[in-house]
Amino acid sequence: MNARNQCINLRVEVRQIREAISCLIDSTLLHRVVGKFKYDQKNLKNYSLGSIGIEEVALNEINLTYVRVNSPELVAVVDKEVHRYVNSIQHLDSINDGLMYRSPRGEQGTGNEKNDPLISTKLQLEFYQVKKKKIFNIIENEDTLPWEIWTIGLDVVKTKQESDYVQMREDVGEKLGEQVLNICNFVNQPKMYMPSTPLHADLPLVFDNRFSDIQPYLFRLNFKDQESAPETLGGNVRKFLSAMTK
């Protein structure tokens, strides 16, 4: 199965990274969450879905208000991952020592000041399902199969004057709003593949069971941490099992 790929590119000021990423992730998850499954304990083939609430979010650094799923648990998980991602960027020397940005609508600056980002960075929001298989009919292994991948690319700049930042608040808000609409249009295309609802026992292979109030499709944020992560025993075991099955 080939995963659907969708790319989003945006230029933001360094103070807008967190809000821009959160907005794009929240706006995508809004369409990839269902209500909590409630099963009939006498017949697990029968179930109903709980309701999903939404809430408005007014951004502080960008002139935009958007809506997201009203789930404190989901918000906390997304915030934690976004915080980890932003921290991996902000410790870079280039954030403090790179070229500045001056809005083309503001005071005239040099070509470099207008066009060159401090850094370009990417992360992926990936939706996946889990497939179980046995190796030598003894060891049960799990493969994760992505079915939809959103790649978010950011060019990060730093404004030189407050007037330029005010203009960027407006410019980024406009472009971010367009991307939110594009997300909505993309996910509502007809005949788009979605994993089928599994039996009760296999629900965790498609949906995330961590949340008490909602049921998102399995998802994760992938990005290259600027500091190399140490290898773990679990990671080495997975590499070994993967090599054995090839």
Image (cartoon, rainbow, N blue to C red):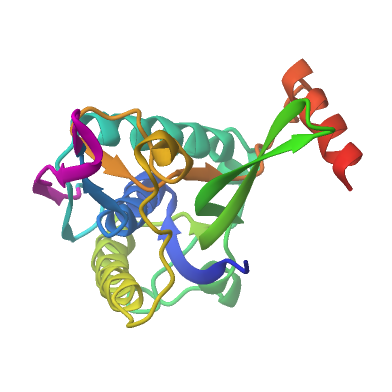
Looking at this view, is 55 or 39 the one in front? Answer: 39
Is 42 in the magenta? yes
Q: Is residue 53 left or right of residue 244?
A: left
Q: Residue furthest front?
A: 42
Is 98 in the magenta? no
Q: Residue furthest top?
A: 233
Point 57% across, 56% down: residue: 146
Residue 228 x, y percent position in the rendering:
75, 30
Looking at this view, is 93 or 41 the one in front? Answer: 41
Count all numbered tags in the image, as a single digit.
Answer: 0
Residue 244 x, y percent position in the rendering:
90, 37
Main structural element of the magenta stretch: helix, strand or loop?
strand
Q: Is residue 1 left or right of residue 187?
A: right
Residue 70 x, y percent position in the rendering:
14, 41
State whether residue 89 appears in this view: yes
State whether residue 152 appears in this view: no
Point 39% across, 58% down: residue: 196
Looking at this view, is 153 or 203 the one in front? Answer: 203
Q: Is residue 173 left or right of residue 100?
A: left
Q: Which quadrant holds residue 180?
A: bottom left
Q: Which quadrant holds residue 80?
A: top left
Q: Is residue 138 above or below residue 47?
A: above
Point 52% across, 51% down: residue: 128
Q: Is residue 126 left or right of residue 35?
A: right
Looking at this view, is 206 or 161 the one in front? Answer: 206
Residue 9 x, y percent position in the rendering:
49, 69
Q: Quadrant of the N terminus?
A: bottom right
What span is in magenta? 38-59
Q: Is residue 78 above or below residue 102?
A: above
Q: Is residue 149 above or below residue 215?
A: below
Point 22% across, 27% down: residue: 212
